[in-house]
Image (spheres, rainbow, N blue to C red):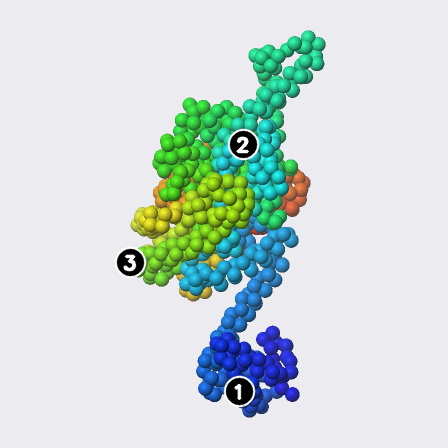
């Protein structure tokens, strides 16, 4: 009795009818009509060759090889070729199924760490399983050349699972949306009349928006938008005080005008009003760290831009929000969200003589405790040129920046990035072998491929309809959606957003090319700027050709920082300074392991901010909690002496999960209650995250981070 060994190792009795079915199927594939007698003859000849092997067991692959040989030897060449192609496609499908099953099995154990905001619960795992399935679908349906570039690590198409489903991120015009009212799908939410309601709805905006998109969302002008809801709240508070007074003897005839003119009553009203604002802002902090989006898998990736109030009500919102964030959560725990961007501007808040200087001081104090807010320099020339025209620049925690627009009104309002693609720069540096002409030739080829990839993604996304993005498009949050109905295609929206060409590993690229990175030599710095400048020039050129908002993007490589290097290490081996780690350095950053002064790091990275018009960021790493004045000294130096824009201070936050005590100086157990239940918080690609949610590459990168403590002391002493 002959036994067949299947691919999974199981055995079964030999069945000749399966050979006949396979031959018949191959013939039908090319519309070749085989007679029944021919099928029997070919089957018998195949069986004879199997018998000649005189084996008790034979594999499926061996049987198929023999059948294919018989078809070719007997003159059925076209059927043989069809049979071969069928086998190849089935093998490909099996491989995909096998890889997918492995991925699903791993997700069942623990979700991956490509996204440090995703948890490990049922919803997270279910979402990741769906994600893996759609990645395979999108790779299988895109042009083979593009799929190959992603699979072999030349390029990376971010959020491949969303390639055919939605777009990236959005700056929300919060005040405008709230004043118009929205419908989240189950009925209309009327415009709020109180600050508490406005604050609560601002969180729902972020949550509902995130359910339609794969990236993050930002309140683009939070303090000024929320300030519009202060006057009706103040009036309501005044009436409450008035009604209370009217019940007291001697105050029966008091009027609104009376109590507003009386300082004691006016102070009481302001005190009650501020208490209400505190409660509203506390609600935002709590909600954004507890309410879930994306099928319950994560809290919203949220950012809040503030710091440039247009009036005292907006300044009050800014002040109170920062104070509530400073308090933390219930036990004083570190809030992970929102990411806060405090915008700094001479004449508004930067100098002691400026009217809102106290807000800048407060922001530095909070940042010294919480790592948030980060800071944005509105006096950087590329920001100031917009500001002077009445356009308020903004950014997001992940660093997305969008202001220019070839297809309409400029500015960030109602706009965001549509989709990014990232180039593996270190691989080009390795392949060039020190030949700069070859490097730039390779880079230009990758840029052309990146453009092709973004155009393909555009061609896929433009077939989506408004009803596919029911909240952000259906409720007209996205610029370009204003005149669209639910069955209209979203192409007008796509043309308002940006298409980003990103990069990773400038430092490793420079080492591969000339032996030093840009923190080590002026030659390397000049070459680094030329490389990134080439990407920007390409984006500017083809923006005009394709009439799409291409932008040069300093990629926030989270999971990607570890993916590219694994692929390159397997191909090229370990190259000192290039592939000898578990991560590539993010975008244009000076390597985290390199000992450099605060001033030098700022000076070196500053010029890249202007080039990277799709998003940029710089961090200063400190070894422990800084003083508020130290944070302010760093930001002051950067903003008064360079053209740097978006930056923040990094240090490692650790606190006791049992009692909330914050730990310093590397203590391993709580200094108050002795607990070993310690939570670590670090920054990853702009946002804060729990230490245990970092991916492998980012864990390695964080371990290598070198603080600037020694230089830091010299910096303040200067």
Instruction: Confirm whether residue 520 shows in the render.
Output: no
Residue 585 x %, y %: 43, 52
**Position of 195 relative to 693 (above/below):** above
Mark found first going from the N terminus, 1 or 3 = 1
Mark found first going from the N terminus, 2 or 3 = 2
Of residues 497 and 491, the one nearer the viewer is 491
Instruction: Confirm whether residue 534 shows in the render.
Output: yes
Helix, strand, or loop for circle 2? helix
What quarter of the picture does the C terminus occupy?
top left
Taking the image as shown, residue 601 lies to the left or right of residue 696, namely left
- Name the disc covering residue 437, or none: 3
Number of dots carrying numbers: 3
Of residues 366 and 145, the one nearer the viewer is 145
The residue that label 1 is drawn on is: 38
On the image, which quarter does residue 405 sit in?
top left
Residue 275 x %, y %: 61, 26
**Position of 101 relative to 595 (above/below):** below
The answer to whether marks 2 and 1 mark residues whose Cβ atoms lie closer than 8 Å is: no
On the image, which quarter does residue 287 sit in?
top right
Seen at 45% across and 80% down, the residue is 78
Seen at 57% across and 24% down, the residue is 232
The residue that label 2 is drawn on is: 179
CA separation in Å, label 2 and label 1: 77 Å
On the image, which quarter does residue 262 sit in?
top right
Mark found first going from the N terminus, 2 or 1 = 1
Q: Residues within 10 Å of mark 1 (few under 14, many from 20)?
A: few
Helix, strand, or loop for circle 3? helix
């Amino acid at each position: 009795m002959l036994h067949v060994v299947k691919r999974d190792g199981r055995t079964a009795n030999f069945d000749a009818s399966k050979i006949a079915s396979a031959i018949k199927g191959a013939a039908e594939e090319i519309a070749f009509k085989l007679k029944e007698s021919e099928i029997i003859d070919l089957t018998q000849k195949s069986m004879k060759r199997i018998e000649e092997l005189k084996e008790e067991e034979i594999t499926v692959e061996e049987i198929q090889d023999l059948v294919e040989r018989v078809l070719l030897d007997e003159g059925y060449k076209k059927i043989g070729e069809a049979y071969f192609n069928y086998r190849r496609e089935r093998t490909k499908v099996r491989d995909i199924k096998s890889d997918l099953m492995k991925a699903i099995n791993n997700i069942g154990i623990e979700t991956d760490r490509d996204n440090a905001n995703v948890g490990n619960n049922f919803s997270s795992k279910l979402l990741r399983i769906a994600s893996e399935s759609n990645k395979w679908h999108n790779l299988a349906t895109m042009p083979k050349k593009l799929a190959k570039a992603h699979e072999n690590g030349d390029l990376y198409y971010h959020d491949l699972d969303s390639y055919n489903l939605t777009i990236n991120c959005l700056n929300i015009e919060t005040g405008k949306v709230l004043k118009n009212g929205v419908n989240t799908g189950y009925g209309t939410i009327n415009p709020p009349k109180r600050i508490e309601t406005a604050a609560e709805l601002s969180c729902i905006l972020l949550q509902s928006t995130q359910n339609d998109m794969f990236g993050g969302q930002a309140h683009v002008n939070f303090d000024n938008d929320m300030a519009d809801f202060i006057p009706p709240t103040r009036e309501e508070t005044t009436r409450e005080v008035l009604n209370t007074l009217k019940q007291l003897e001697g105050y029966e005839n008091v009027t609104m005008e009376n109590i507003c003119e009386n300082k004691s009553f006016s102070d009481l009203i302001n005190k009650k009003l501020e208490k209400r604002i505190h409660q509203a802002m506390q609600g935002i902090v709590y909600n954004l760290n507890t309410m879930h989006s994306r099928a319950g898998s994560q809290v919203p990736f949220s950012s809040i831009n503030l710091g440039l109030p247009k009036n005292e009500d907006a300044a009050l919102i800014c002040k109170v929000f920062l104070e509530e964030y400073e308090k933390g959560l219930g036990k004083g725990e570190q809030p992970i969200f929102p990411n806060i961007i405090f915008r700094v501007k001479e004449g508004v808040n930067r100098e002691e003589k400026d009217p809102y200087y106290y807000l800048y001081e407060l922001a530095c104090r909070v940042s010294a405790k919480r790592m948030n807010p980060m800071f944005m320099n509105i006096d950087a020339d590329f920001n100031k040129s917009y500001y002077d025209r009445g356009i308020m620049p903004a950014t997001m925690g992940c660093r997305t920046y969008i202001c220019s627009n070839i297809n309409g009104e400029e500015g960030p309002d109602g706009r965001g990035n549509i989709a990014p693609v990232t180039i593996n720069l270190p691989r080009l540096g390795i392949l060039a072998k020190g030949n700069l002409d070859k490097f730039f030739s390779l880079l230009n080829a990758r840029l052309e491929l990146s453009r092709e990839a973004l155009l393909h993604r555009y061609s896929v996304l433009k077939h989506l309809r408004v009803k596919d993005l029911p909240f952000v498009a259906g409720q007209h949050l996205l610029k370009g959606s204003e005149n669209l109905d639910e069955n209209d295609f979203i192409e007008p929206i796509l043309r308002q957003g940006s298409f980003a060409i990103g990069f990773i590993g400038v430092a490793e690229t420079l080492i591969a090319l000339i032996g030093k990175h840009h923190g080590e030599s002026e030659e390397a710095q000049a070459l680094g700027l030329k490389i990134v400048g080439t990407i920007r020039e390409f984006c500017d050129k083809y923006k005009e050709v394709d009439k799409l908002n291409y932008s040069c993007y300093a990629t926030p490589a989270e999971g990607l920082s570890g993916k590219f290097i694994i692929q390159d290490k397997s191909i090229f081996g370990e190259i000192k300074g290039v592939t000898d780690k578990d991560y590539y350095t993010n975008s244009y950053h000076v390597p985290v392991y390199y000992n450099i002064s605060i001033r030098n790091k700022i000076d070196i990275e500053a010029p890249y901010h202007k080039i990277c018009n799709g998003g940029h960021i710089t961090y200063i790493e400190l070894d422990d909690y800084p003083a508020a004045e130290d944070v302010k000294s760093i930001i002051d130096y950067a903003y008064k002496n360079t053209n740097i824009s978006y930056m923040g201070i990094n240090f490692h936050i650790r606190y006791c999960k049992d009692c909330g005590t914050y730990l310093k100086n590397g203590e391993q157990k709580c200094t108050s209650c002795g607990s070993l239940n310690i939570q670590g918080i670090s920054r990853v690609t702009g946002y804060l995250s729990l230490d245990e949610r970092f991916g492998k590459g980012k864990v390695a990168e964080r371990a290598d981070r070198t603080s600037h403590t020694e230089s830091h002391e010299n910096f303040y002493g200067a």
